[in-house]
Amino acid sequence: MYVAAGNYTNSWDPNNGAILRSTDKGATWQRTVLPFKIGGNMPGRGEGERLAIDPNKDSVLYFGAPSGKGLWRSTDYGVTWSQVTAFPNPGNYAADPTDTTGYQNDNQGVLWVTFDKRTGTSGSATQTIYVGVADKANSIYRSTDGGATWSRVAGQPTGYLPHKGVLDPVNGYLYISTSDTGGPYDGSAGDVWKYATATGTWTRISPMPSDDSVGDDYFGYSGLTIDRQHPNTLMVTGYSSWWPDTQIFRSTDGGATWKKIWDYSSYPNRVDQYTMDVSSSPWLTFGSNPSPPEETPKLGWMTESLEIDPFDSNRMMYGTGATLYGSENLTNWDSGSKITIKPMVQGLEETAVNDLVSPPSGAPLLSALGDIGGFRHTDITKVPAMMFQSPSFTTSTSLDYAESNPLQVVRVGNVDSSSTSKRIAFSNDNGANWYQGSNEPSGTTGGGNVALAADGSKVLWSPDGAAVSVSAFGGSSWTSSSGIPQGARVASDRVNAKKFYGFAAGKFYTSTDAGSTFTASAATGLPASGPVRLKAVPGIEGDVWLAGGDTTGSYGLWHSTDSGAHFTKVSGVDQADSIGFGKAAPGRSYPALYSSAKIGGVRGIYRSDDAGASWVRINDDQHQWGWTGAAITGDPRVYGRVYISTNGRGIIYGDTTDTPPTSTPPTTTPPTSTPPTSTPPTSTPPTSTPPTSTPPTSTPPTSTPPTGSGGCEVTYAITNQWSGGFQADVSLKNTGTTAVDGWTVKWSFGNGQQITQLWNGTLTQSGASVSVADAGYNKSLAAGGGTASFGFTGNWTGSNTKPAAFSLNGTTCTVK
């Protein structure tokens, strides 16, 4: 398995791209850093696939590079790469050549590689290779000698960019989909072409040709796939058809005729070849009630990727700007029946998270997200029904609640160019309902960031395009704050309602008159460049933490206990990008600290239970999630629970097993049969990765014992103990000669201990007798040493001795 990874090709991203490779289905990875950047979030990102494996000799891979870096090849399974110097065209198309940021003016480069498998034999490199290039005049190239020499394919269409190239090796056709731009947002014309590799004949097979006199073709084509079981069946998307909906076309005769997934009966009424089921992600309706021909939920937009499962003709998936959709009854389309389209994500999100808050009461989490606004998460184990509404922001950039009255919440964000909405919203019921601010500071162009006074009386807003300004809750009128520069980062003291803080360009600012005026602190050594985030500690006036900076100057974590008059840099923290607070550890009064940071030379997510004196890493190398520096917060109600922002992977939450929260777990703790979905326990990690869906919560039948027999070994360890409570880990090993497929371990406590919470298993306890069954995803124990583990917290009085005997599926085990 291979991944080409990288975010941007311009200066926003300092890192070169990399090719990641795995030989164990993604369980572990190795990396080769390339001598150029890769732009996974750049213009033209939907074109491709740039990375391809030779179907005859899988040690050979090709990669089409952006930014004019050409075509690259590996002959050792992706370990080393070299440029194919004979390849003649690195591309020349940029979305906007006049852009000076390096974003729109980047050469989109070599777009895709596809092999004609018929021109090789197993173990020998494929000889004929086709490559698509971002060049409207010279877009398709071919090698017939295994990549040694290349030539432009004769007779090829011109005037458009080849978004996709898919080869049918059975019938010998190369299909390409084209658009007048690189996407993913734009594109107003395009075509689909079929190239007969045997005769060199090009045939335009566009469902709606670019020169259609009716004018129906107002979009470009991109998503392209063939049914590998029936290669005359192909599908293509009109990726840039934003209104009234995207369009998907299907042909069963090699493109001679096409069917639309929707069409007009009589405008504006539509006839759909599908039904939508978004019950697993109900927010995909976006709370809208559009007029025909628009419908909700939409089929999608930016539909640049479409694939029919090569092993199942009934199954397909396609990407959108909101989710990953798919169908599992696709061939119903061919008989005139409707197909069912539903989200295929099962927990995988593509959302970028800008801010997170966890109030002390009400919903456990409120989020500010890019593109879809944000959510009130009343149950962190379930998908919220709807994003924030009335008003809706295209992107929410910041939010805050009143510390002494969490019912009061404020959020700010961006709106589209046609909107008349103000960029600020208020809630009096913990974010359940919202109303638009009645005004906004003059010159406001974007959401920026916002802070709410401890008692909710005042809101301090630092919007894009305007001065830092203050208003009473509700935003009826705004007054510019003096003494603080435009664009400053702002925060509120969590105790004193008159006190606000700000930061900009190395200077810290404090207001003691509810945001009307600010005074610059004399504190020095703070970051003069790079993003900075600041937060004040709940319950302690004047206690402020500041994280941020960049590698060109100061970078780290700072702490002030006098409202920013002085700061102390936290020793041992090399770099820090965010800071958050959660419930204090048992026996401590100061909140637990959380940070996305680099400590001891290691990047990760960290927690401190002693006000920053020491830190423990709470994630591992398998759970990094890319960029996590935008926001982080602990949960003030559950010790050890942390909410982590990602830039494209949604919100991650984790629960600790290092130290139990209390002897009686809080009611907001997920069900005991559901393991944590983010970071596994660091004391004894599970031996297998839980599935993305929630494991079954029912106990396995007791009438028919699980299969497997032979010897077993149990290790029981008390990992932590305090007055009235304890935590223990249990490890199982199958030492027999037969594999176990489903296990139940039993024991009896000798001192009346009671389990209060258990993870990675299903608990039954009656008096002293305890039975723990597998959680489904960890049911298999291989013969001769297969292992599994679970953990729990419990109550004890008097003494807490270890159980004397354990059995596994009725077999008495050796106890260690």
Image: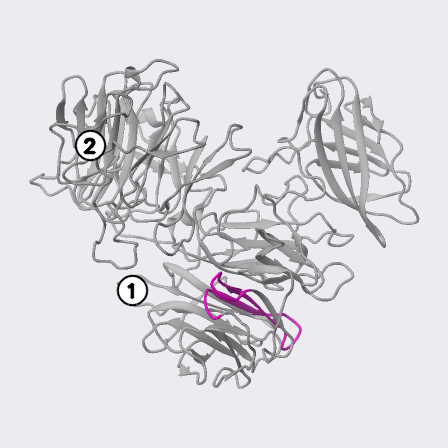
Image location (x, y in percent) of residue 104: 27, 53
Q: Any magenta on residue 813?
A: no
* 73 over 187 or under it: above or below: above
The way the protein has been coloured in the rendering is one colour
Whether residue 136 sits left or right of residue 164 in the image: it is left
Which quarter of the image is occupied by the C terminus? Answer: top right
Q: Disc 2 residue type?
A: Ile
**Front-most of 433 and 681?**
681
The quadrant holding residue 60 is top left
Q: Residues within 10 Å of mark 2 (few under 14, many from 20)?
A: many
Quick one: SS at disc 2?
Answer: strand
The mark found on residue 419 in the picture is: 1
Looking at the picture, tell me which residue is in the foreground, 149 or 610: 149
Task: Relative to 68, say whether 632 is above or below.
Answer: below
Q: Which mark is residue 140?
A: 2
Numbered disc 1: secondary structure: loop
Over which residues does the magenta segment extend? 528-555
Q: Which mark is drawn over residue 610?
A: none
Q: Position of residue 719 (x, y in %)?
A: 79, 45
On screen, residue 472 versus residue 95, left or right, reads right
Residue found at the very far right of the displayed protein: 798
In the image, residue 580 lies at what x, y percent?
59, 62
Q: In front of the other: label 2 or label 1? A: 2
In primary-sequence order, the first of circles 2 and 1 is 2
Q: CA distance from mark 2 to mark 1?
A: 42 Å
Query: Which residue type carries mark 1?
Result: Ser
Q: Identify the residue at image location x=41%, y=68%.
A: 448
Q: Could you say which quadrant of the image residue 510 lies in?
A: bottom right
Furthest-front residue in this view: 85
| Residue 434 spot, x, y in % from top left | 45, 66
Name the residue at 33% across, 49% down. Answer: 42
Q: Residue 364, can we see it?
A: no
